[in-house]
Image: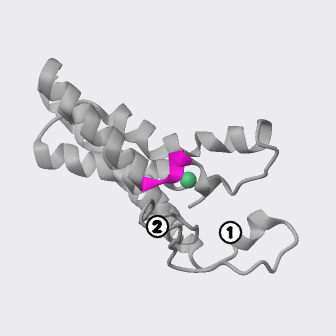
């Protein structure tokens, strides 16, 4: 996925907030939904584009599973119950990122059992500029879908908030 990680993280976190009737920790969901792509900086600035960035540990679900379990154990032992939600939103964001990357990108879902990478659709390299290969492929409709959905939820929430303010005043 290219540009819709943040909108998708927003949609998912908002849905979970609604389900659990809470208003906090949206930021944790948003950060989680973007976080694995910080390896782009490492890819360009340090690694000299030697490794596919989806093969760095930060794009491998196994490591996140371990981190999620350890985090929840630590919170259970020492933290407040509330922190569980913050952590949960963050890790839901992380795993939504990895799942959405799987649409056209290769993710090592079964690592360390196997080094095979899994993906739903292959994007053929037909344009000289690699970004165009993704933007002009039909799978980019998924990205547009999430962007439209996020904007819809955002505007709906704003509208509902304004209605609330005007009835209170
Ligand atoms: Zn990614």
Q: How many marks?
A: 2
**Residue 10 versus residue 124: which sits nearer the camera?**
124
**Residue 18 versus residue 51: which sits nearer the camera?**
51
Report the residue marked by disc 1. Answer: 135
Instruction: Identify the residue at image location x=57%, y=71%.
Output: 104
Residues at marks 1 and 2, CA–CA distance in whole angstroms = 13 Å
Which residue is at the far front? 113
- Determine whether the residue tagged by mark 2 lies in a helix, strand or loop: helix
Is residue 39 toward the left or the right of residue 92 in the image?
right
Q: Earlier in the sequence, mark 1 or mark 2?
A: 1
Would residue 80 be visible to someone looking at this image? no
Residue 35 drawn above or below residue 16: above
Which segment did they paint magenta?
57-61
Instruction: Identify the residue at image location x=54%, y=73%.
Output: 141
Image coordinates for residue 39, horizontal then vertical, percent? 62, 42
- Determine whether the residue tagged by mark 1 lies in a helix, strand or loop: helix
Is residue 161 toward the left or the right of residue 82 in the image?
right
Q: Residues within 10 Å of mark 2 (few under 14, many from 20)?
A: few
Label 1 CB-ligand 1 distance < 8 A = no
Q: Quadrant of residue 70?
A: top left
Instruction: Identify the residue at image location x=50%, y=78%.
Output: 120
* Disc number placed over residue 145 in the picture, else none: 2
Image coordinates for residue 101, horizontal then vertical, percent? 52, 62
Q: Is residue 86 highlighted in magenta?
A: no
Image coordinates for residue 149, horizontal then vertical, percent? 39, 60
**Residue 85 versus residue 162: which sits nearer the camera?**
85
Quadrant location of the N terminus?
Answer: bottom right
């Amino acid at each position: 996925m290219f540009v819709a990680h943040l909108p998708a993280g927003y949609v998912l976190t908002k849905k979970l907030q609604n389900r659990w009737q809470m208003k906090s920790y949206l930021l944790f969901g948003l950060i989680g939904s973007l976080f694995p792509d910080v390896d782009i900086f490492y890819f360009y600035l340090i690694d000299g584009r030697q490794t596919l960035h989806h093969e760095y540990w930060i794009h491998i679900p196994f490591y996140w599973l371990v981190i999620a379990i350890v985090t929840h154990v630590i919170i259970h032992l020492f933290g407040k119950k509330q922190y569980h939600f913050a952590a949960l939103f963050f890790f839901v964001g992380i795993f939504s990122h990895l799942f959405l990357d799987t649409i056209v990108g290769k993710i090592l879902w079964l690592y360390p059992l196997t080094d095979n990478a899994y993906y739903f659709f292959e994007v053929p390299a037909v344009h000289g500029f690699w970004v165009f290969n993704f933007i002009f492929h039909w799978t980019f409709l998924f990205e547009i879908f999430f962007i439209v959905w996020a904007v819809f939820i955002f505007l709906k929430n704003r509208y509902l908030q304004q209605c609330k303010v005007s009835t209170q005043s």
